[in-house]
Image: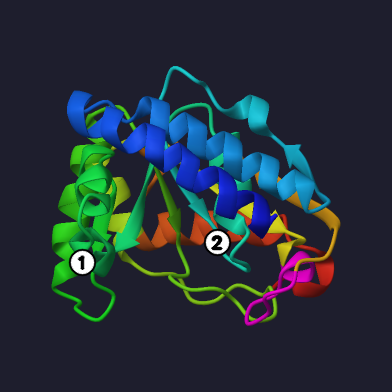
Amino acid sequence: MLAFWAVSLPVAALLGFPWTYLTKDINFLYNTCMSAMWMGVRIAGVKVRTIGLERIDPARNYIFMSNHISNLDPPITLPLLPRRSSVMVKKELFKVPILGRIMLIGSLVPVDRKNRDAGITAVRDAVKAIEKGLNMTIYVEGKRSFDGKLLPFKKGPFYLAEECNVPVVPITISGTEAVMPKARFAIRPGMVTVQFHDPIEPADFGERDCLMAKVRAAINSGLPSELRE
């Protein structure tokens, strides 16, 4: 898988970066990268089972909130989404020449995990991305779990949900903790399940803590029994 990505992604960048830079249209590069990520996962022998994807209306945009247990989570989850999604990326990558500009064109959101005040700016940037009709995909624990059990949630995503007033879709990823555990480079073939739970409509959010509890309960319900709270 890594060898495939090492060959395909630079080719995608070689073709897509100039096109994106000149036209300010990220779609060709985005779709090419999504295809490459998905093919790489399948080449590694990872099978993906989806549950509840039919609940997602392609005509709407959502905030997807997911657990996070492996580096394989984004290349498995993002290609499944019916619309282009923005994600939060550490701000240092935006300083890389050309790449930083491309990420801005793609409405990716820079975030400084070491600066709590910078979280307000990240939320504002995420609002702008959603207002453009993009999805936003957030791993609400803020970092990967070592054992697959849920970590405490960050509050920022729930401020964002209140600000944007778009539906929130909890996602449960399970199986990647065995296929590619945290702190391990090797990948073993296996089955991964990605479960899309019922969208939580803005009218049903309640207070911020209530929304957080609903999202946590949904994600937790999709975990294997031995990992549930």
Residue found at x 27% / y 47%: 103
Magenta-highlighted residues: 177-186
How many numbered marks are there? 2
| Horizontal side of residue 190 vs 91, given as left or right | right
Which numbered dot is residue 216? 2
| Horizontal side of residue 112 vs 39, given as left or right | left
In the rendered view, tell whether residue 99 sits above or below residue 227: above
Residue 198: percent from left, percent from top: 59, 37
Q: Which residue is mark 1?
A: 119
Element carrying mark 2:
helix
The part of the image, by quadrant, that contains residue 30 is: top left
How far separated are the C-alphas under marks 2 and 1? 21 Å
Residue found at x 83% / y 51%: 45
Residue 178: percent from left, percent from top: 79, 69
Residue 84: percent from left, percent from top: 42, 32
Q: Amino acid at mark 1?
A: Gly
In the rendered image, the quadrant that contains the N terminus is bottom right
Residue found at x 14% / y 59%: 121
Q: Amino acid at mark 2?
A: Arg
The part of the image, by quadrant, that contains residue 172 is: bottom right
Residue 125: percent from left, percent from top: 18, 49
